[in-house]
Image (spheres, rainbow, N blue to C red):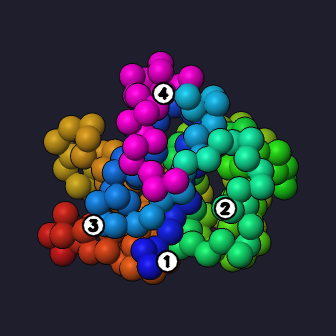
Amino acid sequence: MRERVVVGITGASGQVYGLKVLQLLKEVGAETHLVVSRAAELTMRAEGIELREVKKLASKVYGEEEIGASISSGSFFHSGMIIAPCSMKTASSIAYGITDNLIARAADVTLKERRKLVLLVRETPLHTGHLRTLLTLSEIGAIVMPPVPAFYTKPRDLEDVVRHTALRAIAMLEGKTGERVREMLEEWRGL
């Protein structure tokens, strides 16, 4: 059985991160379960990303209103969940247990089952309320990973920057998927 990864894409700028995560997960053979928020659909249009192309990369796609979907249950076993990008609205919902859509509900279940939840939070500058929300997320077990570029990799272009961030997010996951991507990161850095 292929390892499963849940992917959420929310309305923050940086839709390319969600796209790249899905591309890389497909490359390593993971089964992906995707939820795209309505706000993400609007942002994709503004950023020139085709929703149908994103959906083609996923093994299964759910609507954000499908609260009863399999990924909202603790009995749905997976290697972790990545939300890329993660809006501050979604981050706040997760931090404070407001599970009124499938992305927040799946993230809540991921945390309660003690699985990895990686959040590529996109917001700047941050006010004190944002910082408190991010602290709460960390305290309840989420991995808060703002997509900050790493220049030690000597990126040649934006694609390199996005790829490195997506690889690092996936490397946080459990199992063979995370292991394989950690190997890819080491190969890239020549370690």
- Left or right for 114, reference 175: right
Q: Residue at x 38, y 60 (%)?
A: 25
Identify the image quadrant of the N terminus: bottom left
First reached walking from the N terminus: tag 2 or tag 1? 2
- Mark 4 in CB contact with mark 3 (< 8 angstroms): no
In which image quadrant can residue 143 be found? bottom right
Which residue is denoted by mark 3 in the rendering?
185
Q: How far apart are the two marked residues, 3 and 2, measured between alpha carbons?
A: 28 Å
Which residue is denoted by mark 4 in the rendering?
44
Determine whether the residue tagged by mark 2 lies in a helix, strand or loop: helix
Residue 59 within the segment the image draws in magenta: yes
Q: Position of residue 146 (x, y in %)?
A: 52, 49
Q: How many numbered marks does the figure carry?
A: 4
Asked whether residue 132 appears in the rendered view, the answer is: no
Q: How far apart are the two marked residues, 1 and 3, measured between alpha carbons?
A: 15 Å
Q: Residue at x 71, y 75 (%)?
A: 75
Identify the image quadrant of the C terminus: bottom left
First reached walking from the N terminus: tag 4 or tag 2? 4
At label 2, counting other C-alpha atoms closer than 10 Å, the crowd grade (few under 14, some 14-19, many 20 or more) is: many
Type of amino acid at the residue the image marks with label 2: Ile
